[in-house]
Image (cartoon, rainbow, N blue to C red):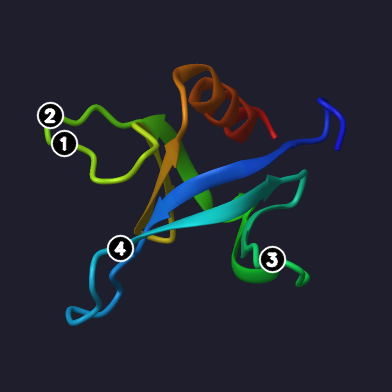
Amino acid sequence: LNNHTGVEGTLIKKSQQKRRTSPCNYKERLFVLDTQDLTYSEQRPGKKPSQKGCIELSRIKCVEIVCSEAPIPCSNKYPFQVVHDNCYLYIFAPDNDCRQRWVRKNKYV
């Protein structure tokens, strides 16, 4: 992927907890943003990445940095959110530069 089409990288996502009984957890995923979609996949050693989610860019309403007073329970401490279809996808970047890059790219694709 070149800089003009999108961005990809390993980030941590928070479970979306669509069911009340689902536990809150944090998973490392390979995120890919291109001109059509934001997708995320599970990377398994020695196996092809398994796609876990895909959000069409046309369905994304907002991408913004999240300010949290609460401690962040995963190793990546720089959260941002992707709002789509009345759902919130919380993603955690390893550093602020990485987070800024994702937020900026999501706004202009």
The amino acid type, in three-letter code, at marker 4 is Asn
* Residue type at the position of mark 3: Pro
Dot placed on the residue nearer the N-terminal end, 2 or 4: 4
Which residue is denoted by mark 1 in the rendering?
A: 71
Q: Is residue 20 depicted above or below 34 in this figure? A: below
Mark 1 against mark 2, which lies toward the viewer? Answer: 1
Q: Is the C-beta separation of discs 4 and 1 under 8 Å?
A: no
Q: Which residue is drawn at 78% across and 70% down?
A: 48
10 Å crowding of disc 2: few (<14), some (14-19), many (20+): few
Instruction: Determine contact: label 2, label 3, CB under 8 Å.
Output: no
Rounded to the nearest angstrom, the CA distance separating label 3 from label 4 is: 21 Å
Between residues 88 and 46, which one lies in front from this camera angle? 46
Q: Nearer the viewer, mark 3 or mark 4?
A: 3
Q: Distance between the residues labelled 2 and 4?
A: 19 Å
- Residue bearing the label numbered 2: 69
Q: Position of residue 51 (x, y in %)?
A: 66, 69
Res 22 quadrant in image: bottom left
Seen from this angle, which residue lies furthest front?
46
Residue of label 3: 45
Residue 102: give x, y in percent of width and height: 57, 31
Amino acid type, callout 2 = Glu
Q: Earlier in the sequence, mark 2 or mark 3?
A: 3
Spatial CA distance of label 3 from label 1 is 30 Å
Q: Which of marks 2 and 3 is in front?
A: 3
Query: Is 48 on the left-hand or right-hand side of 56?
Result: right
Identify residue for label 4: 25
